[in-house]
Amino acid sequence: MRMLHPRPLRNHRTFHQAAPAPPRSPSPEHHNEDDALHLDENGPGDGFMPDPDIENSPGDGFMPDPDTCVQLGPLFRTFHPHLTGLKCNINGDFIDQNLPPPLRTDALPTDWAPYESRVAFETAEFLFTRNQMSAGQIDTLLDLWAATLIQYDDSPPFASHRDLYDTIDSMPLGDVAWESFSMSYKGVKPAENVPPWMKATYEVWFCDPRLLIHNILANPDFDGEIEYTPYRDYDDNNQCCFKNFFSGDWAWTQADKIAKDPEMYGSTFVPLIVGSDKTTVSVATGHTKYHPPYLSIGNVFNSVRRTHRNSLVLVEFLAIPTRPYIADYPEQVLLSGIVTGWCPKCLNNRNALDGDGLLRHREHTDLLIQELQHKQLWYEYGIVGDVVPFTNDFARADIHELLLLDLLHQIIKGTFKDHLVDWVGEYLEHTHGKARAAEIQDDIDRR
């Protein structure tokens, strides 16, 4: 996708590098605008490096001029001048930018704990991850394996599927532990005919999101496919080109806001991408509906996020209580507390979508809820007054700003299935009659 940038670059400097990767920036002391910059092969993700020859460089870092460009094939890239992703220690203090990352573990190559051997580990990986064999089949396989080892007074690495699962769960590294709590409705209840969901208790299972984010950032599999500094790419016509999340205007704008605090200079912006979808779990839950949120970060390449590769992680399971006005409703409207048929992004009525309605905003919605009655909120603004978006607990988050277009319900189902297909059906009946229209639609379905 391309668009004209509102402020064209004044000039492009000539840069050379061996591979198209975010480069190490030149130091101010050695930079010459008239000379070509020859970049060493540091690999992606190094960010801007302070010059070790300049006093206080490890703490201050080098902040490049906003018009500094790096040539990446046919494109020119400018990096954010302040959120430059400098290396730091666990306390946030900048360190020597040439230091390699610390080792992830001190274990010996022969240490397969909690597995007794490499064979045990690879057996667990094959059965649980690659083959995804059922518990009963695992027990059958282990029994057959054990029968072949009796004559040698030996046994398989696992006694049963439960032994296998317990070993996997005891791994000290890997997924963040699951936690749980219970919740129930504590609001006002009607005197009679109390809905079952108001009386029920719901169990919520979750992982610590902060630890999940740490795991993604620390995953060496993403080396070369993760970015630490927002940037903008331009072609020869000064058109802005978008690809990964960090190349977008939103990431740059957020970095500008964060950089208003000079203490943030040199840090890394880690935007969270959260999605969810309703699902029904039938086994051992009585067909309970759950609302599992997923989490990723904007730093990894889009190609990595689309193929998952542990950059998209499950955060929690939320049981869904059935309420009259949100039952079976698309998740975006549920999360934003908007009435069916209203847009979660703007205030236009569904019967006047071409109007000049204002965009929804958290402060405006809060003010309306404070000043108006529920009935007026519902019919005039499309707001469910007693639903509080979860993003209200975060100072910088606005659910209306963060929501993206729902391609499934708004475009595919809403425009094509619910509107266009019905319109074509009505047209065929009006033109050819019901019998002939049914024949034509059957012919279309066969194709």
Image (cartoon, rainbow, N blue to C red):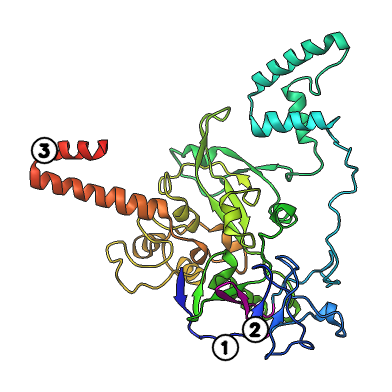
* Residue drawn at point x = 42 percent, y = 44 percent: 328
Left/right placement of residue 338 relative to residue 78 reads: left
- Callout 2: SS: loop
The magenta stretch spans residue 17: no
Q: Which residues are magenta?
A: 65-82
Q: Nearer the viewer, residue 92 or 18?
A: 18
Q: Nearer the viewer, residue 353 or 270?
A: 270
Q: Pick out the residue farthest to the top.
A: 151
**Amino acid type, mark 3:** Arg
* Residue drawn at point x = 58 percent, y = 85 percent: 12
Q: Earlier in the sequence, mark 3 or mark 1?
A: 1
- Callout 3: SS: helix
Contact? badges 2 and 1 (CB < 8 Å): no
Task: Please tell me whether residue 251 is drawn above or below residue 113 in the rendered image.
Answer: below
Residue 122, given in percent of the width and then of the height, sits at: 76, 32
Residue 373, given in percent of the width and then of the height, sits at: 41, 63
Mark 2 Cα-neighbour bin, 10 Å: few <14, some 14–19, many ≥20: some
Residue that badge 2 annotates? 68
Mark drawn on residue 11: 1
Residue 375, given in percent of the width and then of the height, sits at: 37, 60
**Image quarter in which the C terminus is found:** top left
Task: Please tell me whether residue 136 is drawn above or below residue 209 in the rendered image.
Answer: above
**Amino acid type, mark 2:** Thr
Q: Is residue 340 visible?
A: no
* Residue drawn at point x = 70 percent, y = 65 percent: 44
Q: Is residue 416 visible?
A: yes
